[in-house]
Every structure is written in structure tokens, then in C-alpha cells.
């Protein structure tokens, strides 16, 4: 109940700055969302871009830090489940968005105040998706039931 990450992901838009990591063990990086769409399975995916260090420019002198060349990288078909909020008070972490953090963080709160980009599908009390039914005469009098578990909705 305290995890608002999925709701936050439903409200992402192009030009949002988010944390991205492909796998749980990967180090997260800040990326900019270029566009959001659907893949062939209907899952929401995004195209993102970010800066990546390419190589050190020569050997550093004594006591100096190496300088890196940077390149802009674009990734496409990135599932939205790989995105996490870029929070002001956390130090580069990619973790779930708790309600307390969402209240304190201006950027996360702004995203959560947007309308959802995907409609909520009705579900029965056990979480099964309900299928639309053709309206019948006096159908409002008959109780509706889930086609999977037969619970009355």
C-alpha cells in the first residue's frame, strides 16, 4: 500500500528525468525519457538517452583525476518497470517510491499529480480483470459476477 512506484510509472511523460537500471544488481543511472509507447505485446516501453563516459583522455598527471570523453547514448524499447524516481534526498539510489518520500520530493509529487496515461481496468475483489459485457434489458437488477472466480462484484 505504501509503494507508489507503479502509479508513478503510469504517469511518466517524455522529457522526464528518471533513474534506470536493467537488472536489480546494476548500478542505476540518470536518463531522460525521449518518448513512451507500446511494444508488440502492448507493454509500455520508452526510448531514453543518457551520457556515458567512453574512455580516459590520456594518462593523468600526478595527483590529477583522469578526464573522460562523454558520448550520448540512446536506448529504445526500455520497459517502464526498469525506471525509478530520481529523488532529491537520496544519493543515486533506485528504489521504490514510498508515500512519505513522494510527499517530500517535489519532482515525484509533480509526476504523481498528473493524470494516468493508461486507464485503470476494473477488477473483481480477487484481482481478476473484468471483461466488458453487452448490456441486456434489466441487467442493472441482476448482480454482476467475475467470469473467473464467480464472485459477485
Image (cartoon, rainbow, N blue to C red):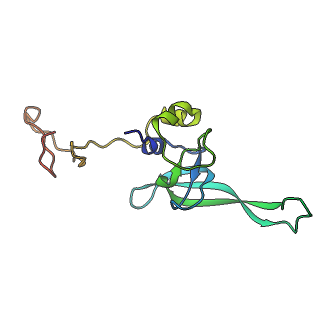
Left or right: 121 in relation to 2 = left
Give the percent coordinates (x, y) of residue 73: 67, 60
Look at 59% across and 60% down and name the residue there: 75
Examine the rendering and report whether any part of residue 114 can be seen. no
Specify the quadrant that holds the N terminus.
Answer: top left
Look at 52% across and 58% down and name the residue there: 78
Can you name the residue that lies furthest to the front here?
Answer: 63
User: Compared to 30, does 136 lie above or below?
Assistant: above
User: Compared to 86, does 64 lie above or below?
Assistant: below
Q: Which of 138/26 is in front?
A: 26
Look at 39% across and 60% down and name the residue there: 41
Look at 66% across and 55% down and name the residue there: 50
Can you name the residue that lies furthest to the right here?
Answer: 61
Specify the quadrant that holds the C terminus.
Answer: top left
Q: Quadrant of residue 135?
A: top left
Give the percent coordinates (x, y) of residue 137: 8, 35
Amino acid at each position: 500500500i505504501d509503494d507508489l512506484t507503479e502509479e508513478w510509472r503510469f504517469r511518466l511523460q517524455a522529457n522526464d528525468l528518471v533513474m534506470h537500471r536493467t537488472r536489480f544488481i546494476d548500478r542505476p543511472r540518470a536518463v531522460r525519457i525521449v518518448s513512451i509507447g507500446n511494444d508488440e505485446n502492448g507493454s509500455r516501453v520508452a526510448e531514453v538517452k543518457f551520457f556515458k563516459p567512453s574512455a580516459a583522455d590520456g594518462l593523468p598527471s600526478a595527483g590529477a583525476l583522469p578526464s573522460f570523453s562523454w558520448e550520448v547514448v540512446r536506448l529504445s524499447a526500455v520497459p517502464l518497470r526498469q525506471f525509478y524516481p530520481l529523488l532529491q534526498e537520496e544519493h543515486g539510489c533506485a528504489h521504490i517510491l514510498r508515500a512519505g518520500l513522494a510527499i517530500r520530493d517535489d519532482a515525484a509529487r509533480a509526476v504523481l499529480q498528473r493524470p494516468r496515461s493508461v486507464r485503470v481496468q476494473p477488477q473483481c475483489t480477487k484481482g481478476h480483470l473484468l471483461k466488458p459485457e453487452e448490456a441486456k434489458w434489466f441487467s442493472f437488477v441482476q448482480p454482476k459476477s467475475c467470469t473467473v472466480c464467480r464472485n459477485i462484484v
